[in-house]
Amino acid sequence: MSRFDHKRLFLPGPVEVRREILEAQTAWMIGHRTAEFAALFARLQGKLKRAFFTDSRVYVSGSSGSGLWEGAVRCGVRDDRKVLHLTGGAFSERWADISRANGVQVDCVQVDWGKAHTADMVAAALDEASYDAVCAVHNETSTGVTNPIREIGAVVKQHDDTLFFVDTVSGFLGTELRVDDWGIDIALTSSQKAFALPPGIAFAAVSDRLLERAKTIAHRGYYFDFLTLEKSLLKNNTPSTPPIALMVAADMQMDAILVEGVEARWARHRAMRDATHAWAIERGFGLYAQEGFRSDTVTTVANSLNIDVNAMGEFMENEIGFAMDKGYGKIKGATFRLPHMGDVTLETLREVLDGIDAFMAY
Ligand SMILES: *Cc1c(COP(=O)(O)O)cnc(C)c1O
């Protein structure tokens, strides 16, 4: 048994949520067809647009991020057209599976796990065939790779009929993302990663172009249909009952984020990344992700010292008080991830790294 009644989460989602944000969820419930709710919706909308660097709109979804994967593909890819997925990690590969599950024809630009996609790879694929959309993962949480979304967006922009869909689930509010400048038609994210909210609510910045495309598609489903969401958004509302308590928490968290400054938040994540890299290299570990594309929000450590990752996790839980990642999917054990995302500070990160040192000396 652990002597800690709360183990701080040092996981790549869900992340540790500050007490005051948790408590914001306990405000008295309000009805969602009220002026009070519309005010909350409008307030949050304005803040989310600043966070995504978009002038268009941000949908709020009572789901995790995966639901919006489905929405993007259903609203953006026409019958008998193809979608191009940039795959090379657990999440990018799952998104491609979800497109297939929705009956869409999928081609992939597959890279080895740990490698990034380049703009050249995407340019070559778009010269070969025409696609309704390109789907990219901004920050591949399973491998710790950040893809060059700005550069890829510039390539996609040269193809008039091709939309650009970006999963920024573990990048948003942790590393640079500029939706309008980078030509992104949907940037979708979850709450429980660098946003540092509880899970259960998801967000998507969506362009006018994607809404125009959706109008040409007959069967878009309902729950993640952007035209349905748009109709309600124009009235500061949602088609079905929204996660009101989570929206209250999100509104409060956005205030804190805007006080810190979105760009300052990116810089804090970058500093935590640099400290984590220095620690890993000094100890003799490797860094799994390709140089030049290493994530600001999660470092995947190549376990070249062969530490027992499960024993390390147990030590951290029982002796130091952190719940740790023990590796993901097919690279579990050979790697472990140090997620430095959300409201984590350099001091907390230092406690974690000192704890792993203590385990290794043990
Ligand atoms: C966590 C994660 C997801 C899945 O998000 P859910 O909120 O669990 O649906 C998708 N993509 C990436 C990159 C992730 O890190």
Image (tube, helix red, strand yellow):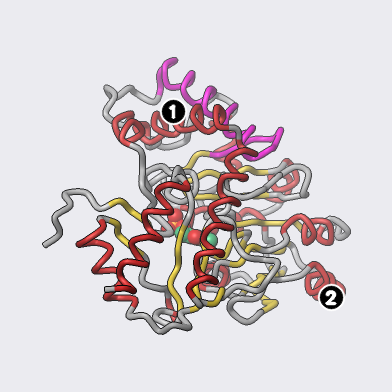
Sequence-wise first label, 2 or 1: 2
Q: Position of residue 304 (x, y in %)?
A: 48, 83
Q: Are marks 2 and 1 in contact (CB under 8 Å)?
A: no
200 vs 88, nearest the viewer: 88
Tag of residue 288: none
Residue 24 in picture, x, y percent from top left: 33, 28
Question: Does residue 283 sit above or below 12 in this rendering?
Answer: below
Would you call the spot at circle 1 few (<14 residues within 10 Å), some (14-19), or many (20 or more)?
some
Q: Position of residue 161 (x, y in %)?
A: 82, 58
329 sits to left or right of 143: left
Instruction: Identify the image quadrant of residue 315.
Output: bottom left
Q: Main secondary structure of the magenta part?
A: helix
Question: Can the viewer see residue 262 in this picture?
Answer: yes
Looking at the picture, how far across and down is residue 110, in whole percent? 66, 79
Residue 124: give its label: 2
CA gap, disc 2 to disc 1?
A: 44 Å
Quadrant containing the C terminus is bottom left
Identify the residue position indicated by label 1 in the image: 252
Q: Does 57 appear in magenta?
A: yes
The residue sitting at the top extreme is 35
Residue at the spot x=72%, y=50% of the render?
Answer: 184
Circle 1: residue type: Met
Dot 2: element: helix
Residue at figure coordinates x 58%, y 78% from the top left: 113
Q: Quadrant of the N terminus?
A: bottom left
Label 1 residue SS: helix
Q: Specify the segment rendered in magenta.
A: 33-59
Residue 147: say if magenta. no
Give neighbour class at mark 2: few <14, some 14-19, many 20+ (Cα, 10 Å): few
Q: In the orientation shown, which residue stands out farthest toward the left?
A: 1
Q: Residue at x 66, y 79 (%)?
A: 111
